[in-house]
Amino acid sequence: MPGKLLIFIVMLNSVASQLLLKRAVGEIGSPTGFASLAEFFRAAAISPPVYLSLVLQVAGYAMWMIVISQQKLGVAIAVLGSGFYVVMAVLAWVVFDERLSPLQWAGIALVTAGVVCMMSGPST
């Protein structure tokens, strides 16, 4: 599988895992202080969506090992990170109605432009 395609798959996997985890902890509720941490983690420990998120993270880690065996680490992480930020921002807006300011969107655009520059060089 071509490296850049695998980076894209890892990125989508990471986004899916984080969205699932956000929904799961939203259902569990937020700890209100140190005293409620034990109950929070107990609830997380029996939550199927938390386990599914963990399984996705492990699968992503396995795929990531393949990516970094084939690609420059600096380029691979820049591509993964930039794609993650953009896709996560859009999906968090769609799924959870989370909004970013124009300045935050500008920052994402600048990061993306930098990654395009990094990808323009040779891959090995």
Image (cartoon, rainbow, N blue to C red):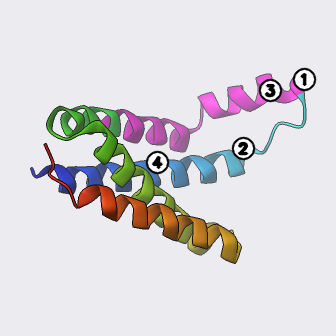
Q: Earlier in the sequence, mark 2 or mark 1?
A: 2
Spatial CA span between label 2 and label 1: 16 Å
Please tell me whether residue 15 belongs to the stretch shown in magenta. no
Q: Residue sitting at 70 percent across and 51 percent down?
A: 26
Spatial CA span between label 2 and label 4: 16 Å
Q: Secondary structure at mark 1?
A: helix
In this rendering, the answer to whether 14 lies above or below 32 is below
Find residue 28 and report its image quarter: top right
- Majority secondary structure of magenta residues: helix
Image location (x, y in percent) of residue 102: 68, 77
Tell which tag, 2 or 1, sits nearer the viewer.
1
Q: Secondary structure at mark 2?
A: helix
Q: Earlier in the sequence, mark 4 or mark 3?
A: 4
Which label sits on residue 37?
3
Spatial CA span between label 3 and label 2: 12 Å
Q: Nearer the viewer, residue 121 or 70?
A: 121
Hey, what amino acid is under mark 4? Answer: Ser
Please tell me whether residue 48 belongs to the stretch shown in magenta. yes
Image location (x, y in percent) of residue 119: 26, 58
Residue tagged 1: 35
The reply to whether discs 2 and 4 touch (Cβ–Cβ < 8 Å) is no
Q: Residue sitting at 45 percent across and 41 percent down?
A: 52
Which label sits on residue 28?
2
The segment highlighted magenta reads: 34-59
Residue tagged 4: 17
In this rendering, the answer to whether 64 lies above or below 102 is above
- Packing grade of label 4 (10 A; few <14, some 14-19, many >=20) is many
Hey, what amino acid is under mark 3? Answer: Leu
Image location (x, y in percent) of residue 3: 16, 49
Extreme left residue here? 1
- Packing grade of label 1 (10 A; few <14, some 14-19, many >=20) is few
Q: Nearer the viewer, residue 26 or 72?
A: 72
